[in-house]
Amino acid sequence: MNGTSRRAIGLIAGEGRFPFLVSQGIRQQGYRIVAAGFREHTSEELYAVADSMVWLRLGQLGKLLTYFKDNDVDRVVFAGPINKPKALGMIPDFRAARLLFRTRSKHDGEIFQALIHTLRNEGIEVLSPLSFVPALKTPEGILGKRKPSKKEEADISFGWPLAKEIGSLDIGQCLVVKDNIVIAVEAVEGSDATILRAGELAGPGCVVIKVFKPGQTETIDQPAVGLQTIRSMVQAGASCLALEAEECLFFDRQDAIELADAQDISVVGYCSPDD
């Protein structure tokens, strides 16, 4: 454990490597790491990385707020997804139940906005994780060796506004199209399962589109892809991946692009025509 004289950043950690990457960025900027993890979601290895850590069950909002106050945390960052099917059995405490009661639905966007509002009311600012890992931003342009074909470009142009519309309804971030037909839409199952389902339904040649949901906060639940995304596309026979540039996180980019190039998959950081 390090001394407590340095200012702390609270880390609300979900699944995967993202909490570890954000932790490195926090540490490099000279802050203490005061982490909160969730059983069955957060890797136990994060305990060794943090200066302080508490384990919670989903829905323990009151305990989370008390923990941060006790550790003089006034800034927090969210990193890593929560497995949504596993979260369906969440038992909220009083603070979480009150938050859920005030929201009109259980859609991610509304819950996240209500959570941010609650934290701010407690004097805690929510930071974007990209302030600690800016290199994960998807750049604009052709990211691999192959440009999208005219057919793939037509599918991107067709699917992009639909993906944005679906995102605005707070349904999902991923849409798969082929021949100007919507093949699959992401819901609670996640992008990889959506891509695999599209391959089963439509066969090779699908175009995968991943966007930032309109109205979505950039501090929580950013769209993300990585090496596993490309592996799923290979398995499904998908031929092109279009990501929203500057908004989508791209993990293991070099390895992912190398695999995409080897499989003749086009990967492009795309900006909306009106951006």
Image (cartoon, helix red, strand yellow):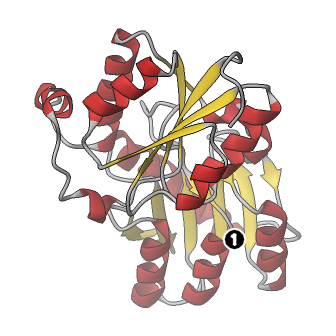
Whether residue 167 is visible: yes
Tell me where residue 247 sits by quadrant: top right
What percent of the width, then of the height, locates residue 149?
Answer: 74, 71
Residue sticking out furthest to the right = 145
Residue beneath disc 1? 227
Residue 175, above or below 139: below
Residue 155 x, y percent position in the rendering? 57, 64
- Residue at position x 69%, y 71% in the image: 227
Tell me the element at label 1. helix
At 20% from the left and 52% from the top, the residue drawn is 90
Question: Would residue 228 appear left or right of 113 to someone viewing this image?
Answer: right
Count up the numbered dots.
Answer: 1
For badge 1, the amino acid type reads Leu
The image position of residue 254, as x and y in percent, is 84, 65
Q: For the point 65% across and 65% down, which residue is it?
A: 241
Please rate how many residues cluster around mark 1, counting C-alpha atoms within 10 Å: few if below 14, some from 14 to 19, many from 20.
Answer: some
- Residue 118's place in the image compared with 151, above or below, is above
Front residue (pair 195, 56): 56
Between 102 and 125, the residue placed more toward the observer is 125
Q: Residue at x 49, y 72 (%)?
A: 192
In the depicted structure, whether residue 55 falls above or below residue 143: above
Residue 137 visible somewhere in the drawing: no
Quadrant where the image shows the C terminus: top right
**Left or right of 201, for residue 169:** left
- In percent of width and height, residue 68 lies at 44, 24
